[in-house]
Protein backbone atom coordinates (compact mmCIF):
# COMPACT_ATOMS: atom_id res chain seq x y z
CA UNK A 1 0.00 0.00 0.00
CA UNK A 2 2.87 2.37 0.79
CA UNK A 3 4.27 1.84 -2.71
CA UNK A 4 0.91 2.74 -4.28
CA UNK A 5 0.57 5.91 -2.20
CA UNK A 6 4.16 6.87 -2.86
CA UNK A 7 3.75 6.38 -6.61
CA UNK A 8 0.69 8.63 -6.54
CA UNK A 9 2.69 11.26 -4.67
CA UNK A 10 5.70 11.17 -7.01
CA UNK A 11 3.75 10.68 -10.24
CA UNK A 12 4.96 7.16 -11.01
CA UNK A 13 2.32 4.96 -12.65
CA UNK A 14 3.64 1.50 -11.74
CA UNK A 15 4.22 0.67 -8.06
CA UNK A 16 5.72 -2.76 -8.87
CA UNK A 17 8.22 -1.26 -11.30
CA UNK A 18 9.18 1.36 -8.74
CA UNK A 19 9.65 -1.31 -6.05
CA UNK A 20 11.91 -3.26 -8.42
CA UNK A 21 14.16 -0.22 -8.91
CA UNK A 22 14.10 1.21 -5.37
CA UNK A 23 16.89 0.27 -3.01
CA UNK A 24 16.24 -0.99 0.54
CA UNK A 25 17.65 2.29 1.84
CA UNK A 26 15.24 4.36 -0.29
CA UNK A 27 12.29 2.26 0.80
CA UNK A 28 13.28 2.53 4.47
CA UNK A 29 13.63 6.31 4.11
CA UNK A 30 10.19 6.64 2.52
CA UNK A 31 8.64 4.41 5.20
CA UNK A 32 10.19 6.55 7.94
CA UNK A 33 9.00 9.74 6.25
CA UNK A 34 5.48 8.34 5.87
CA UNK A 35 5.38 7.48 9.59
CA UNK A 36 6.22 11.09 10.40
CA UNK A 37 4.11 12.81 7.74
CA UNK A 38 1.52 10.48 6.21
CA UNK A 39 0.01 11.51 2.90
CA UNK A 40 -2.97 10.26 0.94
CA UNK A 41 -5.37 9.91 3.86
CA UNK A 42 -7.15 13.25 3.58
CA UNK A 43 -10.54 11.58 3.14
CA UNK A 44 -9.96 9.41 6.20
CA UNK A 45 -8.94 12.43 8.30
CA UNK A 46 -12.04 14.31 7.12
CA UNK A 47 -14.28 11.37 8.04
CA UNK A 48 -12.58 11.13 11.44
CA UNK A 49 -13.22 14.82 12.04
CA UNK A 50 -16.87 14.45 11.03
CA UNK A 51 -17.26 11.45 13.33
CA UNK A 52 -15.79 13.48 16.19
CA UNK A 53 -18.10 16.43 15.47
CA UNK A 54 -21.09 14.08 15.43
CA UNK A 55 -20.03 12.84 18.87
CA UNK A 56 -19.89 16.42 20.16
CA UNK A 57 -23.35 17.14 18.72
CA UNK A 58 -24.63 13.94 20.30
CA UNK A 59 -23.35 15.08 23.70
CA UNK A 60 -25.03 18.44 23.21
CA UNK A 61 -28.30 16.70 22.34
CA UNK A 62 -27.95 14.41 25.37
CA UNK A 63 -27.60 17.43 27.63
CA UNK A 64 -31.10 18.39 26.45
CA UNK A 65 -32.53 14.91 27.02
CA UNK A 66 -32.42 13.90 23.35
CA UNK A 67 -30.40 11.34 21.44
CA UNK A 68 -28.91 11.75 17.98
CA UNK A 69 -28.71 8.87 15.57
CA UNK A 70 -25.13 7.71 15.87
CA UNK A 71 -22.72 8.01 12.94
CA UNK A 72 -19.84 5.79 12.03
CA UNK A 73 -16.73 6.41 9.96
CA UNK A 74 -18.33 4.63 6.97
CA UNK A 75 -21.15 7.21 6.96
CA UNK A 76 -18.62 9.80 5.80
CA UNK A 77 -16.67 7.63 3.35
CA UNK A 78 -17.34 6.60 -0.28
CA UNK A 79 -19.70 3.64 -0.68
CA UNK A 80 -16.87 1.36 -1.88
CA UNK A 81 -14.66 2.07 1.16
CA UNK A 82 -13.51 -1.10 2.92
CA UNK A 83 -13.79 -0.77 6.68
CA UNK A 84 -11.26 -2.90 8.53
CA UNK A 85 -12.56 -1.99 12.00
CA UNK A 86 -15.16 -4.01 13.86
CA UNK A 87 -18.66 -2.66 13.25
CA UNK A 88 -20.07 -0.55 16.05
CA UNK A 89 -23.61 -0.92 17.30
CA UNK A 90 -25.95 1.70 15.93
CA UNK A 91 -28.49 3.28 18.18
CA UNK A 92 -31.70 4.86 17.11
CA UNK A 93 -31.99 8.49 17.99
CA UNK A 94 -33.67 11.70 17.09
CA UNK A 95 -33.88 13.13 13.60
CA UNK A 96 -32.56 16.45 12.37
CA UNK A 97 -35.82 18.29 13.17
CA UNK A 98 -35.48 17.43 16.84
CA UNK A 99 -31.82 18.40 16.72
CA UNK A 100 -32.68 21.78 15.19
CA UNK A 101 -35.17 22.43 17.98
CA UNK A 102 -32.43 21.74 20.55
CA UNK A 103 -30.04 24.11 18.80
CA UNK A 104 -32.76 26.77 18.55
CA UNK A 105 -33.44 26.48 22.26
CA UNK A 106 -29.71 26.93 22.97
CA UNK A 107 -29.39 30.12 20.92
CA UNK A 108 -30.44 33.51 22.27
CA UNK A 109 -33.89 34.65 21.08
CA UNK A 110 -32.56 37.33 18.71
CA UNK A 111 -30.47 34.76 16.83
CA UNK A 112 -33.11 32.04 16.41
CA UNK A 113 -34.06 33.43 13.01
CA UNK A 114 -30.53 32.57 11.78
CA UNK A 115 -31.08 28.87 12.28
CA UNK A 116 -33.26 27.24 9.68
Image: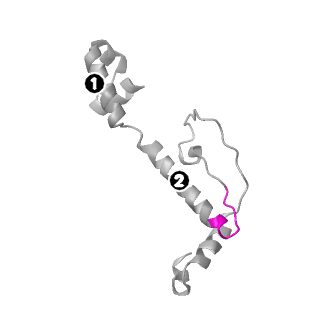
In the image, the segment drawn in magenta is: 61-69
**Residue assigned mark 2:** 52
Question: What is the x, y in percent for residue 44?
Answer: 47, 42
Looking at this view, name the residue that lies furthest to the top. Answer: 20
Look at the numbered disc 1 and give the secondary structure of its residue: helix
Q: CA distance from mark 1 to mark 2?
A: 33 Å
**Residue assigned mark 1:** 29
Is 110 situated above or below 73?
Answer: below
Q: How many discs appear? A: 2
Residue 63 visible to an observer of this rendering? yes
Principal SS element in the magenta part?
loop
Looking at this view, name the residue that lies furthest to the bottom. Answer: 110
Q: Quadrant of the N terminus?
A: top left
Give the crowd class for mark 2: few <14, some 14-19, many >=20 residues within 10 Å: some
Horizontal placement of 103 versus 26: left or right? right
Question: What is the x, y in percent for residue 59?
Answer: 61, 62
Please give the name of the residue rendered at 66% of the width and 42% of the height, measured from the top-left corner.
88
Tell me the quarter of the picture where residue 19 sits.
top left
Amino acid sequence: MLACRLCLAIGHDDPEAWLDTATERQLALWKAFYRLEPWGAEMHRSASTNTLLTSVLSMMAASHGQQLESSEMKDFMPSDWIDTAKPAKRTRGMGMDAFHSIVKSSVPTADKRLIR
